[in-house]
Image: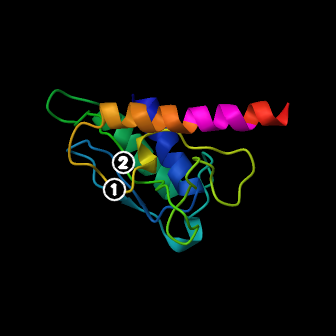
Amino acid sequence: MLAAIEHSARIWVAAGAAEVATLQTSVNAHHVSMELRGKAVPGENEPLDKWLQAMRKAGLPRNGAMVFSAHQMGSCRMGVSPDESVVDENGKVWGVESLYVIDASVFPTASGANPMVTNLAVSHMVATRLAETLKACE
């Protein structure tokens, strides 16, 4: 779990994150200076390396780290315009060839309830449309 947190933090910083954080109660968020954003390889970002060492040292003590999962809904909205959505009505990412999103992130917003049945329905619809598209290409 700690290795996953470290790799995730390095990915976020490499992608330009201004701040990274864990859900460990004894580890404060790490603010990434502008000149170090994008620098995440071990040894090239000393403040990040030190923060990650502190994160590993803190570990995952009982009641000292929150671990949970959540349904991420609406983060890659489906819609009819690239100005207001990430994917079209077929789940295809606007402007990117052969990239489809088929999960609860295509919802227009968080539903406020367990999305299992809705997610199954949307995923079935998008997967069926994708299968038809692929068959037509054969």
User: x, y (%) of residue 71?
Assistant: 32, 40
Residue that mark 1 sits on: 109
Looking at the magenta stretch, what is its main secondary structure?
helix
What are the residue bounds of the magenta stretch?
127-133
Image quadrant in which the C terminus is located: top right
User: x, y (%) of residue 90?
Assistant: 59, 47
Q: Looking at the image, is mark 2 or mark 1 earlier in the sequence?
A: 2
Furthest-left residue in this view: 63
The answer to whether the residues at label 2 and label 1 have Cβ atoms under 8 Å apart is yes
Disc 2 residue type (three-letter): Met
**Mark-to-mark CA distance, 2 and 1:** 6 Å
Q: Residue at x 62, y 44 (%)?
A: 100
Q: Residue at x 50, y 60 (%)?
A: 79
Displayed quadrant of residue 72: top left
Q: As rendered, which of 32 and 105 lies closer to the eye?
A: 105
Disc 1 residue type (three-letter): Thr
Displayed quadrant of residue 63: top left
**Residue neighbourhood size for the residue with mark 2, other residues' Cα within 10 Å, grouped as few (<14), some (14–19), many (≥20):** some
Residue that mark 2 sits on: 73
Q: Residue at x 39, y 56 (%)?
A: 108
Q: As rendered, which of 104 and 36 lies closer to the eye?
A: 104
Q: Tell me, for residue 17, which label it has, or none.
A: none
Q: Which SS class for mark 1? A: loop
User: x, y (%) of residue 118?
Assistant: 34, 37
